[in-house]
Image (tube, rainbow, N blue to C red):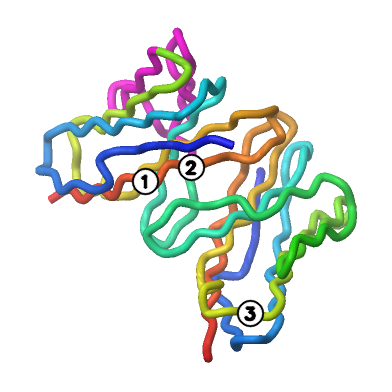
Amino acid sequence: GQNIDQPTEMTATEGAIVQINCTYQTSGFNGLFWYQQHAGEAPTFLSYNVLDGLEEKGRFSSFLSRSKGYSYLLLKELQMKDSASYLCAALDSNYQLIWGAGTKLIIKP
Amino acid sequence: SAVISQKPSRDICQRGTSLTIQCQVDSQVTMMFWYRQQPGQSLTLIATANQGSEATYESGFVIDKFPISRPNLTFSTLTVSNMSPEDSSIYLCSVQPGHENEKLFFGSGTQLSVL
């Protein structure tokens, strides 16, 4: 079956760095997305990786290893506004999105 | 990019009634999707809204319960029929303006509570 695993919840300190991991098992693979979702709001796009390696975008970076079925989202210089859920989603061979349950990130001062 | 207007933003409904959610996009898009997000859980795809033809439903979702209309490339509706408390959830429409491996844009969601 198809499956996405990511931690349920993580806590980090303002100004620090946090890495949110995601492992996936899908029928074929056409890329991996990370979305941010603040409480009570819709998800917003953060990143898309289809090739191995690290993609950096400001304070946020996303990494993909296709051979390991693994991705992570790295958040640097954490701010209180980064408190949100982070959703990992893999695109399978039929271009169907398989969603993880999300990681709730709590930022403490 | 795409700007999506979804309404209502929230509603409280009685058991057995139906609610229609509307999704309006500011540009023509081929792919429109309807998702459900239950409390503390991730997104579950209900169906793909196809313009000019019947929607494509995912396993566990049927047309009688979740009829969908897609009269043109900028508009779609999802109806939650004969509601029960188990239908209490956030319903999200989303669009994919570009190619199949491009990002989704989401509407602001409809928070539905069924009493």
Q: How many marks can you see? A: 3
Q: Where is residue B29 in the image (x, y as percent from the top left)?
A: 54, 23
Q: Which amino acid does label 2 sit on?
A: Phe
Does the segment drawn in magenta span residue B67?
yes
Q: How crowded is mark 1: few (under 14 residues within 10 Å), some or many (20 or more)?
A: many
Q: Mark 1 lies on which chain?
A: B
- Tell me the quarter of the picture where residue A29 sits: top right
Q: Which amino acid does label 3 sit on?
A: Leu
- Which quadrant of the rendered structure holds the N terminus of chain B? top right
Give the magenta part as a residue range: B45-71
Indicate which disc residue A78 carries: 3
Q: In 3D space, how far apart are the residues under numbered discs 1 and 3 (Cα atoms)?
A: 27 Å
Q: What residue type is labelled 1?
A: Gly
Residue A70 in the figure: left or right of residue A53:
left
**Which one is in front, B52 or B43?**
B52
Indicate which disc residue B106 carries: 2
